[in-house]
Image: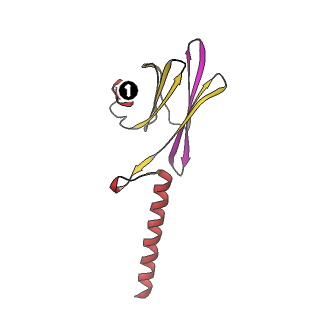
Amino acid sequence: MNANNKMTLIEDDNLGKGHWFFFNIDKSELAVFVGVWGRQVVYVDECTVSDQKNKGPRSVHEFNLHGKTFRLTVEGKRFLDTYSSIFCRLYEDTRLLAEEKKENIFKLPFGKTVSRNQFLLFNFAISFVVGLLVVLAMNKF
């Protein structure tokens, strides 16, 4: 199972991009898609067990598998006004089985990728230096 095959199962053309999380439960594979517009789809062995749209910072998906109850939480960590990272945690009843974190990644020129926080810090530093140079230049004239 891979993300490209799963995107064909999601019929909404507006999704575009998002994050994929993969977990193994016994002999079953769990795949979770978290879209940039709040859509979250949970698959177990290529069957949809939960599909919801969430606008809040935290969502919970519950499903039964092999006679056991599982709970999957998706939580976004905010930095300024958007999510800088997304956590996906899988629980069996109350016991944490697995956890995965994805950072929002920005692609810079020349193939360099950085996290959102690094991108904001880089932009702040460049803006500060340019602003300082403009102030110094204005003081000389």
Query: Dot 1: few (<14), some (14–19), or many (≥20) neighbours within 10 Å?
Result: some
- For residue 9, which quarter of the picture? top left
| Magenta stretch, residue numbers | 59-87
Residue at 38% x, 38% y: name it: 17
Task: Return the residue found at the far front.
Answer: 27
- Which residue carries the number 1 mark? 6
Instruction: Let me know if residue 119 is in the magenta part.
Output: no
Where 80 sits versus 57, above or below? below
Query: Residue 28 placed where, x, y %?
Result: 50, 18
Instruction: Let me know if residue 76 is in the magenta part.
Output: yes
Residue at 33% x, 56% y: name it: 110
Element at badge 1?
A: helix
Q: Name the amino acid, label 1.
A: Lys
Task: Return the residue found at the far top.
Answer: 67
Where 58 sits versus 81, above or below? above
Query: Residue 27 placed where, x, y %?
Result: 51, 17
Query: Residue 57 placed where, x, y %?
Result: 55, 38
